[in-house]
Image (cartoon, grey):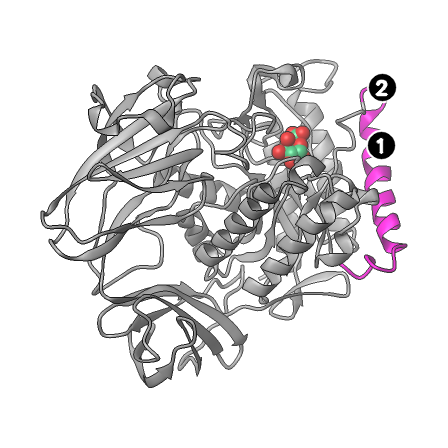
Amino acid sequence: MNAYPLFKRRKTFCLDGLWEFAFLGDGVDLDLLDVDGIHFEDRLPVPSAFDAYPSYAGKRGTAVYRTEFDFPVECGGMIEFLSAGSYCRIYLDGQQVCAHHPSYVRFTVPIPPCTFPRRDLRVVIDNRFHPKRTPLQESFFDFYNYGGILRSVTVHELPETFLEYCHVVPRDVVVGDIELTVYLGGHLPPEIDMNIMIDGRDAMLFENLPVNDGVARISLRLPNPTTWSPEAPNLHTLAVDIGQDDMIVRFGLREVRAQGGKILLNGKPVKLLGVCRHEAHPQFGPALPYQQLVQDVELLQDLGCNFVRGSHYPQDQRFLDLCDERGILFFEESMGWGQNKSHFTNPEFVDAQLNQTKTMILTSFNHPCVLMWGFLNEGESDVEEARHCYESLIALIRKTDPSRLVTYASFKRRTDLFLHLVDVVCYNTYPGWYNAFDDEDPLGQVLPKIRSDVEFLSGREDLKDKPFLLSEIGGGALYGWKDPLNGPWTEEFQAELLKIVCGEVVGNDAISGVSIWQFFDGRTYNCGRALGRPRAFNNKGLLDEYRRPKQSYFQVRKIFREYTSASCPE
Ligand code: ADA
């Protein structure tokens, strides 16, 4: 079930499986930890969130995972971690070779050549909140922060010159023109020969390609181009072979633009009908097995969704692969949740934001399902102190990937200072739910609120031509809670609220889409928020945390599917 990119010649092997494990409690000073002296009494699978397991549920502190692997003597290579955190230190043969945060982003660790084959790998994980070690993950977030080796670990044997990334940008989706950018690692030659294989059958040789700062660029035309769209998610593969190394990437021929208040996919306006999805499950935390990812995608398609917002961190590459294959459009955002000016004026925080955002883009670059990049969910974006951070992130995203849209989910909405800098205006808004209970008729204010936002934006010269997305909207319901008064927390109330919302989204041409908050219930915290988070869960899911559908699921499904069948009747 590996995600792309794949390899034919390069030797890789996956270290997923049972590792030795020890939980050391919350009193460990990481700088004094004798990693070699640890006594392992337990074993846990990798990937796993160790605090999703009953024996470690709710615990915060230091954990250590250990495994061994054989690696050719005198050979160079790397270990790829797709997610580990919140904070981790990697030890190879007793030497610390890496310290990393945050969770949810890919990182690699060099394997220095060695005189013996059997290597000892220890991963120290700390899931405590720490201003220096975990500046991007804080305890005030409204989702539970787990710790562990949350996604796959793979060992790569690497030659002297190797491929780091192979990124494809479609230039003409009809005739199949693409631009391939190849990032090399290790020894960087001044030029390189490259064999390209398209879709496993059409070979092209490019000789003496110039290499500038480790980057080689090729423009080429696909022999048999097929475009990618939600209706026809055609995918192409491209194998790059530089003789000593190879890489197979998968991509889709599609183009996305924001124009005239619409999101255009391959030149056609698209209405985004979807949900916000956490990577979460009570049994696994964010370390979801592949089977659960497939079930989630099946449910999204059953719901009639053509869109998902991956909230609120970089996503599992296997899930993005599934969305590529099923034609489900994606809004991927780097990790952020309600940070404020104290963060935005902290250079370490800004650097950490820029690093994780760039890594997210480089890792997810080839997924045609990703239409837009986002960041800083619900940041304090109506103060001047935030300007540098927002402008730096927007500039970084546009420089790293000019082919996609840029946005962020704003809860400052009308006082927001930076929405004119992005391509899509995204409002997180909760009419009928928050501050609605002092009103006899909370549901009566849903439509007026949405329409007044649409009117406000239409009156803003700098915003009126941008697509408008309801990036979060919804209300809570406890699975199975029915009550004759049909008040808040009943399934009926939530279903009625979302009936009004979705009816407006599909009926109002000024609204480009919705990502309902949220797909399924997710664990949060018991703290002061518990009054608004029964069970210490965020209960605004269309399904509960075990993916059991509430009434609202069927209500939303009816509206989404009717709209879709009316829009493409075949
Ligand atoms: C915010 C936030 C979500 C969730 C939501 C809610 O919009 O972005 O993560 O906390 O509010 O349920 O209130």
Quarter holding the C terminus? Answer: bottom right
Is 449 part of what is drawn in magenta? yes
The magenta span reads 437-466
Q: Is mark 2 within 8 Å of ligand 1?
A: no
Q: Position of residue 432 (x, y in %)?
A: 78, 29
Q: Quadrant of residue 259?
A: bottom right
Q: Nearer the viewer, residue 353 or 310?
A: 353
On residue 445, the disc is: 1
- Ligand 1 falls in quadrant: top right
Identified by mark 2, the residue type is Asp
Q: Is residue 50 above or below residue 553?
A: above
The residue located at (84%, 52%) in the rendering is: 457
Q: Which mark is residue 233?
A: none
Crowd band around label 2 with a 10 angstrom C-alpha radius: few (<14), some (14–19), many (20+): few
User: Which label sits on residue 438?
Assistant: 2
> 531 or 15, which lies in front?
15
The stretch drawn in magenta includes residue 357? no
Please name whichever residue, 16 or 132, is drawn nearer the observer in this view of the structure: 132
Asked if residue 569 can be seen in this view, the reply is no
Amino acid type, mark 1: Gln
Residue at position x 51%, y 46% from top? 301
Find residue 232 and report its horizontal and vertical position in percent.
49, 64
CA distance for labels 2 and 1: 12 Å
Which badge, 2 or 1, comes first in the chain's sequence? Answer: 2
Badge 2 marks a residue whose secondary structure is loop
